[in-house]
Amino acid sequence: MRIKTTLSCNNSKITIIFLAFSFVFVLLSIFGGINNYSPVPYMDMWDGTISFYLKSLSGKLYPWIAQHNEHRIIIPKIFFWIDLALFSGKGISLIIVNYALLTLVVLFFSILLWKKTIPETGFLSFFIISYLFSWIQNRNLFLGFQNQFILAQLLPLCSFYFLYKAKITNGNFSIKYFTISICFGVASAGSMANGVIAIPLMFLYSIIVKMRWRVSALLFCFSIGIIFLYFNNFHANPKHGSLLSTLSQEPVLFIKYILYYLGGPFYYFSGKGTFGLFFAQISGIALVISSIYFAYKSLIDRDNHHLELALLTFLLYIGGTAFGTAGGRAIFGIDQAFSSRYMTPALMAWATVLILYIPLLNNWARKRAIMVWFPFLFMLCCMFPFQLKALNKPKWKLFEDKVAALALELGIPDQRQILHIYPNAKHVLEIAKKAAEENISIFDLYPIKDARYRLGKSKNIKKYDVTEKKNNLGHIDEIYYISSGKKEFIRFKGWCFNKADFKLPELIEVVDEKGVVIGVVLTGQPRPDVAKRVHKKAIYSGFKGYITDSASPGDKLWLLGVDSNFMCQVTVPDTLGNYVATTKALSKITVTMDQVLPGNSWTGTDYYKSNFDGKRVLGSYVKSDHDVGEIRLKLQKGDSIYYRTGPVHTSQIVTIQSNSPAEFTVPGAKDWVEMNFTGRKLPDEFIVQFSDQGNQWGEWSAIALRTNDDGVK
């Protein structure tokens, strides 16, 4: 009795530890959703939510059943419609739905584990809470569009479970549970494309567990009907890969993709990298072998393993999902298998495998409990570092997304900025125009709402407090001209700061010397460089926005805070275009190695180690992206070189050293471009300095100079 009491006490302590972990994991996951929330629609949301809702206002059925890529997301569209119709499309209700659906998933597995475990393994009910709330699936939590990725697993899981319940209820077949399972099965087809196989798998399950022939026949009819309705007028996405071509042309890649997909969680838990890839592949193999083992074991004695067979049917469903995903997405690269949106089905697959292992774990725990709880505790410790990432607030991304929304509100086709939230500026501008007219989503929220109507208004600059003016600092760092076809706009960024109360308005109007509003900018961009030079509280002093092309280099502009007394005067800077012209058409290089001045620290190359006949590549990339340095060239007006940057180029600077020096952040060039020094403001002779000041991922730049031949390889 004394031994049993001690054991029970130890079990309680272990359970409390796992309970504490589950509380922290859930809390961190919720913080992550709050930190990453943005009211700006992201990527698929423009077509799948905004455009869908606008089309649904016609009252026709087609917008509801129309394809989104290869999916018919009928059930998710219900949530999208509610968010837009009742909550103006702010997206908060959609994020709540994501967490609510995940909570239902957790409850399902946790209750099932609680019923099957013994006191020594009771901690697993709390382990599964931490595990299923893992932040590795973060995009399925903080993006409002992603509820389908949870629904597409939860609905089939429920359909298989209730079909199992229909079979075993009081020894009789339950029509109630069977009806519920059919409803979940049909709904599965309206979640994502993989949901269409739910009812066919229910039919397979009915055959395996020897249900009445009428039940199997009905499920077969439902399967045929669902497949017919789903693929009626179906159009394959030409941008995605073909299952048959991937299988025939890249069979090894196809298999590896599936294994990485299934073992994806352990890629993150083991720290990513080379070892993470290896461990993910081994984990994927382990899941497949475990599934085959339990399938064999359950089929031998199928009359006593109906639940296990239902869970194995769900694993087969996840396997089919991985199979189909590999066929369409493997062409995008093996790393795509680790996308956070794919981690939800992988996590649920492993939770299912855990339930299948419970009898074995119970036997081990009776002999020596530490053999069971210690590996799971160790696993939680490995999961915890990634979970802490939920505390990081992506201020930079949230700011850039909002500036992109400002571009849409103003009708400016700024492809480079809009790329933050959608790949095609022209297409999304059409959607945004209609959304702004309806005042939905981000276009119904300050400071984006009606920003276009601020342009052209007159402002009385004299009414602003002169004392307040002295406390404000500001500077425009760079401007970039954007053509909309009808008129020119200027995207410009810089920083401003109030050194008295350290506060900045969220929205600033840009006013010319005549008192006319010619643009608007948003504040809040992270500027650690300004914080270092001006004041530590100026960390978010950056601004970015748009003005009309009525402003020219050298003009004085006023920055006036909306609903605040903030005001400061700034000068429009010169543009790189006045000095340098760039073109993607590579023709010739006139600058030779002899024109490189002493002190060159660009002793590396570009990341891709490019090679040109008769030319030499000099770059800041020596050993890694962390390398920095500079190179100076003595040039004449009309000279040309090749130039290239990494994917991040905010710290890549070009400086023109002459009687009128000028400094610019160079535009990004993921491929080689020709840079011609033919600008009207250049003197006949000058010195140009290229500088890489960035030490983060993707920050590097390189140039190519002539040695002898001009041939390009």
Image: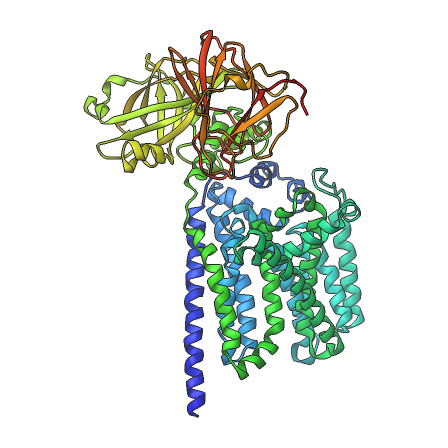
Q: Position of residue 599 (x, y in %)?
A: 43, 25
Q: Is residue 486 above or below residue 9?
A: above
Q: Position of residue 246 (x, y in %)?
A: 75, 46
Using the rendered view, name the quadrant where residue 158 is placed: bottom right
Q: Nearer the viewer, residue 629 or 302?
A: 629
**Residue 142 visible, this orientation:** yes
Q: Position of residue 504 (x, y in %)?
A: 30, 33
Classify residue 312 as left or right of residue 395: right
Which residue occupies 58% across, 33% down? 423
Outermost residue on the left side: it is: 467
Question: In front: 430, or 492?
Answer: 492
Colouring chosen for the image of the structure: rainbow
In depth, the one of 153 and 582 nearer the eye is 582
Q: Position of residue 522 (x, y in %)?
A: 39, 30
Q: Is residue 484 visible?
A: no
Q: On the rendered structure, is 238 left or right of 63?
A: right
Q: Quadrant of the N terminus?
A: bottom left
Specify the farthest residue to the bottom.
1
Q: Is residue 577 above or below residue 332?
A: above
Is 182 located above or below residue 539 in the figure?
Answer: below
Query: Quarter of the image containing the C terminus?
Result: top right
